[in-house]
Amino acid sequence: MRFALLLLILLALALPAVLLAAPGDSEPPPAPRQPLPPVATSTPAPLPPVATPEPTPEPGRPARPSRAVGLPYDGRLVRGRQLPESGPGWATWDPIRKRVGNRGWRRWGTGRLLHVLRTVLGDYARRHPDAPPVLVGDLSRPRGGDFGPRFGGIGHASHQNGLDADVYYPRVDRRLRRPFHPDHVDRAAAQELVDAFVRAGAQYVFVGPSLGLRGPSGVVQPLGNHDDHLHVRLRG
Ligand SMILES: [Zn+2]
């Protein structure tokens, strides 16, 4: 009896403590007031890259054909067309930021160059439905002109009048990035792309000297710094 009474007293003493403690067990203490989201005074968001104004076609009229002016290494582009960021069987690669999706101002060319790229790469994708997209690198700037080192990396001596495009060789491991080493290159796939650009009427296809890629002499030419991509040039 005394024991039961003692138990009752203990329970009566402990109960309020349990009740008081219960909310603290399930709920975290109230969070301190959240500071307001940072206002863009101290760290302003980066501005979108300022590019040469993009030519806009006049509404209601069919766009006049684009025109490659001058030479690939000393020229400009009139009424160029922008290659989209990706399409059926291909994607673009930013060679400076080293990532998929090239910046818009780096992918302008003549309508004919865009047509050749889409046709060759679309056909390749149809022949290899399981292959990852082929990566397209730089074309020209919106109005062409200098595309040298001030635009990043080693720059381009040519790529000035919308007739040049870089296309990365597919990789043996099928990863969607440029082949950083000749051993990464799927040489059979690379040769197939070289052949296709030759058939499409390229004036030149510059290829890496380490890869053993072949083609009509005078058209397919080995050139340094091309072990990761081929460079296709159309006639002016
Ligand atoms: Zn090139």
Image: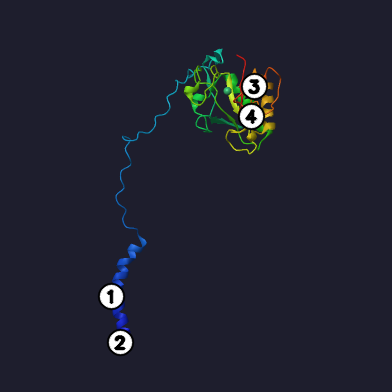
Closer to the N terminus: mark 1 or mark 4?
A: 1
- Position of 4 with respect to 129 (left or right) is left
- Residue underneath mark 2: 2
Q: CA distance from mark 2 to mark 4?
A: 92 Å
Q: Quadrant of ligand 1?
A: top right
What kind of element bears circle 3? strand
Residue position marked by numbered label 4 in the rendering: 122
Q: Nearer the viewer, residue 138 or 206?
A: 206
Describe the element under mark 1 as helix, strand or loop.
helix
Q: Is mark 3 within 8 Å of ligand 1?
A: no
Q: Amino acid at mark 3?
A: Val
| Residue to which mark 1 is pinned | 13
Going by the numbered disc 4, the residue's amino acid type is Gly
Nearer to us of marks 1 and 4 is 1
For marks 2 and 4, give the one nearer the viewer. 2
Res 200 label: none
Whether residues under marks 3 and 1 lie with C-beta atoms below 8 angstroms apart, the answer is no
Mark 1 surroundings within 10 Å by alpha-carbon count, few (fewer than 14), some (14 through 19), many (20 or more):
few
Q: CA distance from mark 2 to mark 1?
A: 17 Å
Q: Left or right of 90: which side holds 55?
A: left
Residue displayed at 29% across by 71% down: 16
Q: Mark 3 or mark 4, which is nearer to you?
A: 3
Q: Along the polypeptide, which appears first: circle 3 or circle 1?
A: 1
Q: Looking at the image, tell me whether mark 3 or mark 2 is earlier in sequence order.
A: 2
In the figure, 69 relative to 6: above or below? above
Question: Tag 3: Cα neighbours inside 10 Å, few (<14), some, or many (≥20)?
Answer: many
